[in-house]
Structures are given as C-alpha cells and as structure tokens.
Amino acid sequence: MIVETGSGVSDANSYGEQDVATTIANCKAYATDRGVDMATATDEQVSSWLVNGTDYIESFSSDFVGTQKTITQALSWPRTNVVYPDGSPFPDNKIPTDLIHALYQSVIEQKNGIVLQPSQGGSGSGGKFVTFEKVDVIETKYSETIGTGSQPFLPKVDQLLDGLLTGTMFALRTVRI
C-alpha cells in the first residue's frame, strides 16, 4: 500500500494519515470505536481493504469539488480551489478528514462482507452481489438482501463524502480564484 497524505504521490493507491502503519492503526481504532471487532483483522487485510475502499472513493472522482493539484498524482486528492463554507481555503496539501473517515467506514463495510464494486451479471449471479468467494474448490455465495444495483448502498460512506462532491449542500465548495 502506498499512502497519499496530501503531497500528490504519483503511485499512491490509498488515502491515509502520515504513513501505512499509522493509517492501519487509525483505521482499526475508528472501527473499534464504532463497535467493530478488528482483533482478527491482519494488517495485510486492512491494507487490502483500504486500497479497495480508495478504489471505491475514486469512482466519484469526476464529482469532487475543486481541481486535482497535479497532473502526475495518482489519486483525486489533494485538490486546489476548495474552500470551507465560511469562505476560507481548504489546504491543497491535506486530505479531508471526511474522506479519510469514509475510507475507514468502507473498511468496516468490507469487514462485514460487503463487496464495494462487485461484478454484475454473469451466469449464476442473477444480478446479486457476491458476498463470499473461494478460489480453491470454487465456491461463490450471493447476497439475497444487499440488492441488485450496480453498487451496494453505503449510506454512511455516502454521507461522509457528500460535502466533498459537487452539487451537494454540505461542507466544502469550489470557488474560481
């Protein structure tokens, strides 16, 4: 895992805080604070979930407020021309706390068996979400309750990202300078 903390890393594949170890520790603490037992989750699992969560968050990249800071950065954040609702500029060398928390919430969702960007269709799935997949002695389980849309419904993740997206009424907005 290569963490983007706000400097515009060209090969980052996850958002985070300070470094990989701090990001994983803070993610586990976030989940534990919300009653999710992370004792059995290895750092490798959490790292993988963070990368998958970042991939999910990046699916909103065209809707983020502001402008990507550099053309060479791998992820959508950091961004320029982003301001707080009071009109003060949001630093272009930081990752918003709400984005980090949305990422950590996506880890909770994955720990609970949700596939953030499931493949749809195909034989046998009936449009349902894959909730478990085993490679050796092939085994796949599909959800009966998650739904049949193109992505799962993640209200807490969506709420945390809401203020970072254009066309929303919360948190940050874009201003041309």
Image (cartoon, rainbow, N blue to C red):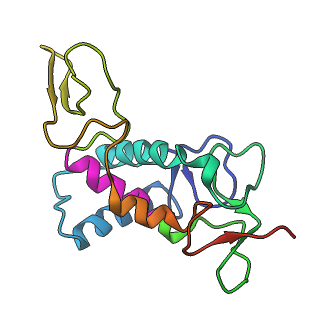
On the image, the x and y values in percent for residue 67 come to: 74, 56
Q: If the image is split into quadrants, where does the C terminus sit? A: bottom right
- Answer with left or right where residue 140 lies relative to residue 159: left
- Answer with left or right where residue 65 lies relative to residue 115: right
Q: What kind of secondary structure does the magenta stretch mostly adopt?
A: helix
Pick the front one: 156 or 51: 156
- Answer with left or right where residue 124 lies relative to residue 1: left
- Answer with left or right where residue 16 lies relative to residue 148: right
In the image, residue 129 sits, relative to residue 101, either above or below, namely above
| Residue 42 appears in the rendering | no
Residue beneath the point at 39% across and 59% down: 157
On the image, the x and y values in percent for residue 49 come to: 35, 45
**What span is in magenta?**
100-113
Report the label total. Answer: 0
The extreme bottom residue here reads: 86
On the image, the x and y values in percent for residue 43 come to: 31, 49
In the image, residue 147 sits, relative to residue 123, either above or below, namely below
Quarter-wise, where is residue 172 in the image? Answer: bottom right
